[in-house]
Image (cartoon, rainbow, N blue to C red):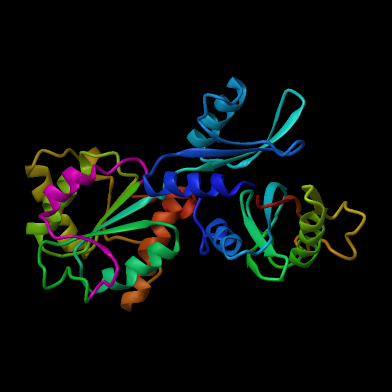
Amino acid sequence: MTDVEDVLSIAAGWQATGEQVAIATVTETWGSSPRPAGSRMAVTKSGKMAGSVSGGCIEGAVAEAAKQVMASGAPKLLDFGVTNERAWEVGLACGGKVKVFVEPLT
Amino acid sequence: MKISTIAALNRALATRQPVAFAKNLTDGAEFLLPDPSAPAALNEAGRMALAADKTGTHMLGNESWFIEARNPSPRLILVGAVHIAQALAPLAAMSGFEVILVDPRQGFGNQERFPGATMINDWPDEALDRLRPDIRTAVVTLTHDPKLDDPALDRALQSGAFYIGALGSRKTHASRLERLTALGHDAASLKRIRGPVGLDIAAVTTPEIALSIIAEIVAVRRGGSLGSRTP
C-alpha cells in the first residue's frame, strides 16, 4: 500500500490549519476499474483536492458528495458504474464498477 | 475517519508494523487491527487481509466492513552506489519501495551523489546480516566487483528475499556462479539470481537499464507473466 501522494497525511495537515476535510475511499471494485480498493482522495470545504479514486471520471461527483458530507457530518457510500442510473452523467468509461465511501475527517 | 487514526497509521508505517484499517460502512466505527477491543471475527479478517496483502470489503455477520491491508513498504537493497543506482533509486522509490543503498566506498556512497538516501557504508555481507532481507525485500548487486557483489549475493541467497538480481554480462554471470558454487551454493539456489538483471527490453541507456530492473522486480512481486524466466 504505497502511492505517489500520502493523501491521509495531506488531509491531516489541512485539518491542522483549520480546514474542514472529507476523505473518499474506494472500498470495492468490480471489473476493470482504474484505481484499486484503498485508493483515496481528500477534499476540503475550500475546494482543495489531493489523491484520486478513479482515472478522473468520477472525481467531480465525489467532490460534490464530499461537500454534502462536510455540511451534514454524515458519511455516504457512493456507487459508480455502468449499471448505475447516473451512468450517462457520471460513469466509468472503462465499464467497471466502484464503491466509494465518503466521510468527514474528525 | 479520525485524525488519531491517521496518526496511528503513520506511527505503524514509521516502525514497519503491519496494520489493517477497518471501517464499518454502516455505522462508521473504525479500528486499527490488531486491536483487543475489536470483535474477534474482525481481528481475524484483518490478519487474513494482511497475510494476503489485500484490501476490500467483507461481510461480517450482517455488517459490511472495509478492511485495508497496510503492510510495510517492500524494500530494495542496492549494493553499489554506482551510476545505475542513481537512476534506479528514485524510480524504485516512486514505485513504492523503501530503497537502501549499500557501498563501503564513500567516494560512491555519499549524500552528495544520493541526496536524502538511506546509505550504509559497510561491507555488503555485514550490511545484509543487519538488514535481514525477508519475503518483502529485493536485493540487486550493481558494482561489477566480485569483492562487493559476491558477499552480498552469498547473504541474499541465504535469505528469503523475493528477488535477487546481479548486474553484469552473461560472461561475468557465468564466472560469478562458479565462485558462488565454490562458496557452497547449489544449482537450484543459484537459479534464484537473475543475471543478466532486468527484463529484456534491449535497454541501452542507464535509465533504461534501471527501468528494466524495476519492471522485473514488479513483475516478480505481482506475479506477472514477465516475472518468470524460462531457461
Give the image location of residue B98, x and y in percent.
Answer: 36, 56
Q: Describe residue B39's horizontal placement relative to residue B102 as left or right.
A: right
Which region of the structure is painted magenta? B113-136
Q: Describe residue B50's horizontal placement relative to residue B60 as left or right.
A: left
Give the image location of residue B156, x and y in percent.
Answer: 22, 45
Looking at this rendering, what residue extends furthest in the bottom direction?
B205
Give the image location of residue B54, x and y in percent.
Answer: 56, 41
Say which of B133 and B32 sits in front: B32
Q: Describe residue B218's horizontal placement relative to residue A39 as left or right.
A: left
Say which of B199 and B46 sits in front: B46
Q: In the picture shown, does residue B75 fall above or below A49?
A: above
Q: Is residue B120 magenta?
A: yes
Say which of B65 and B30 sits in front: B30
Looking at this rendering, what residue extends furthest in the top direction?
B40
Q: Indicate the quadrant where residue A66 lies.
A: bottom right
Q: Indicate the quadrant where residue B207 lies.
A: bottom left
Give the image location of residue B84, x and y in percent.
Answer: 27, 71
Q: Is residue B227 magenta?
A: no
Looking at this rendering, what residue extends furthest in the right direction?
A85
Q: Describe residue B92's horizontal placement relative to residue A15 as left or right.
A: left
Q: Can residue B200 be seen?
A: no
Q: Residue at x 68, y 51 (%)?
A: A26
Q: Indicate the quadrant where residue B208 lies.
A: bottom left
Q: Residue at x 56, y 25 (%)?
A: B37
Q: Can residue B77 be seen?
A: yes
